[in-house]
Image (cartoon, rainbow, N blue to C red):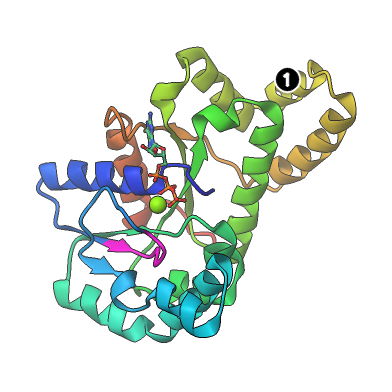
Amino acid sequence: MAGSGKSALTAAYLGFLRKHDQDALVVNLDPGATVLPYNPDIDSRNYVDVEKLMLDYKLGPNGALIMASDLLADRLEEIRGEIEDAAPDLVLVDTAGQIELFAFREGGRFIASHLSDDAKALVFLMDAPFTRRPLNFVTNVYLAAAIQSRLGQPQIYALSKSDLVDQSELEQIIDWSTEPESFELALHNMDEQNLALVSRELSRAVTSAGFLAEPIPVSAENATGLVELNAAVTRILSGGEERRE
Ligand SMILES: Nc1nc2c(ncn2[C@@H]2O[C@H](COP(=O)(O)OP(=O)(O)OP(=O)(O)O)[C@@H](O)[C@H]2O)c(=O)[nH]1
Ligand SMILES: [Mg+2]
């Protein structure tokens, strides 16, 4: 989701990888970004100019970003070429905040599958302070499932900004993710029982389809959880985990 900490985590993970002498490359796929907490090796802003699209085509910011995403897809061969020339061990790709751009439109889906022919893993961020409320948890679970079914890449769940919530709240979110009964109990204790009922049915649909895995608490602020995140990424990229295409 927008503002869930994607760019901050990209910066923290990149720092972690480089500290451990890994040859990592970072790609900024957000053409609308103004300030980034890392220095992109490959930058979508070198390929499309969102401000110019707004002016030239009289578009609003979202219309311009949609157009930018389609234009980027058209230039994917060049971006792929930049990655292939650098031949790094690992490429971190930071996506745009507008989730529908990347996940739900053809351009984003095309980029996600064709950016590289090598193994890929998608890290879905669940913003921990947001996710601690049961209805927000359902929203995240649904978005995660929608992305998984659209992009078809192996997916890792990270609980971002974990420094902003208590340990007990983190444990509760993890319980909700791994034990559907514990989430149903939380819904049962909610005041808005009409919403709880809908949420229960929605979450049952997703959990019974096996979409959710245990989320990994991470903090870009404190650089915590990166060992665990890296282990999960490595497991998928080295083929240790079955790919769901
Ligand atoms: N305390 C804390 N704040 C964080 C953490 N990660 C990100 N933030 C803050 O959350 C805000 C959004 O972070 P970004 O990394 O820009 O989030 P994003 O998902 O890249 O945002 P968009 O690209 O705009 O969708 C910033 O103010 C960050 O400083 C974290 O681990 N801990
Ligand atoms: Mg960002």
Q: Position of residue 57 (x, y in %)?
A: 53, 83
Quadrant for the C terminus, please: bottom right
Q: Main secondary structure of the magenta part?
A: loop
Considering depth in this image, is 61 or 148 the residue closer to the camera?
Answer: 61
Q: Is residue 90 above or below residue 198?
A: below
For badge 1, the amino acid type reads Ala
At a point 32% along the width and 71% down the height, the residue shown is 45
Q: In this rendering, would 138 be left or right of 227?
A: right
Q: Position of residue 163 (x, y in %)?
A: 39, 23
Considering depth in this image, is 67 or 160 the residue closer to the camera?
Answer: 67
At a point 22% along the width and 77% down the height, the residue shown is 82
User: Which stretch did the figure color magenta?
Assistant: 27-33
Q: Dividing the image into four equal quarters, which quarter contains ligand 1?
A: top left
Q: Which residue is mark 1?
A: 186
At a point 27% along the width and 32% down the height, the residue shown is 223
Q: Is residue 117 above or below residue 23?
A: below
Q: Position of residue 166 (x, y in %)?
A: 47, 15
